[in-house]
Image (cartoon, rainbow, N blue to C red):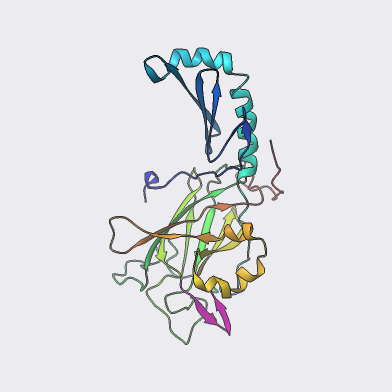
Amino acid sequence: MAGDDFQAHDIRARPITVLEAPIIGNAAHANVDEHQVEVTIDSRNEFLQVRIEEKNRLGDGLVGEKNLHDRRRVLGSMVLGAAALAARGALAEALRPTATTGDGPFYPDRLPLDTDNDLLLINDSATAAVGEIAHVTGRLLERSGAPVRNAVIEIWQSDVNGSYIHTQGRHEGKLDGNFQGYGRFLTDSEGRYYFRTIKPVSYTLNGQFRAPHIHFAVSKSGHRLMATQALVKGHEANERDLIVARIRDPAALETLMVEYRPLADTAGELEAQFDIVLGQTAEELADGSLAAPRAARRRG
């Protein structure tokens, strides 16, 4: 999928104050004399954009670039200075680390011959796997909002029968031989990834019930950084799931919930976005190796 098809991550910052104007989402509004000031924070690039509008006898109007520059000089210490400090604090605290759950028992004991990011087709097969087609995308981020590039995202999940490709993870001996069951993708410069797979289903294996989920693992420079699971937001089976029951913090649990929506201009296909926020930094050294993980520091 082309990069333009991805949506930029939307940081939902907690309200903070700039000129007694709370930042909600990524913008703040304040009145300075007769001017309406809007400060917009670009969460990917930490860029502050200031838009100043003034009211005059002719009605509302946008101040021109030259005037904007002049007014920045006058209002700079009041707006930009406060906004810059607020933006840094918001970006540092806005992203909650994705809860980790470990690999679980059914990480493939033998990798399939095809390990690409399209789990519906194995190599050049013309027969697709059974199930609701789902396009799963997202970004890999540090807590600051910075993207993590060149990291390997792995996913694995059961087929529509509730069977994994792991030899001990078969449900009643049923296995969709056309489902790849495992895939991996290298994140791009913006930390983005993409998989085409099926919407997960609930199952019972070895006497244990599980709500629908997809396993995710993140590695960089040969080091495993974390493993987690993405569950289906609002699914009734979540109430009976052991992972859901073990995560007592509702905010942490929410980091694993993914909404599946109809994909426009398709015959019943779905799309889902699952952004993964690392609780540890993934610092890459000059030689391309990965530094030992360290706890993410709070900044701002």
Of 108 and 241, which appears nearest the observer?
A: 241
Q: Is residue 208 magenta?
A: yes
Residue 252: x %, y % from top left:
63, 58
- As drawn, 79 above or below 120: above
Q: Is residue 225 visible?
A: no
- As drawn, 35 above or below 205: above
- As drawn, 260 above or below 180: above
- As drawn, 66 above or below 263: above
Of 16 and 280, which appears nearest the observer?
A: 16
Residue 271: x %, y % from top left:
40, 58
Quadrant occupied by the C terminus: top right
The residue range painted magenta reads 201-212
Of 49 and 184, which appears nearest the observer?
A: 49
Which residue is located at x 57 percent, y 13 percent? 74
Q: Is residue 85 visible?
A: yes
Residue 29: x %, y % from top left:
53, 30
Of 241 and 60, which appears nearest the observer?
A: 60
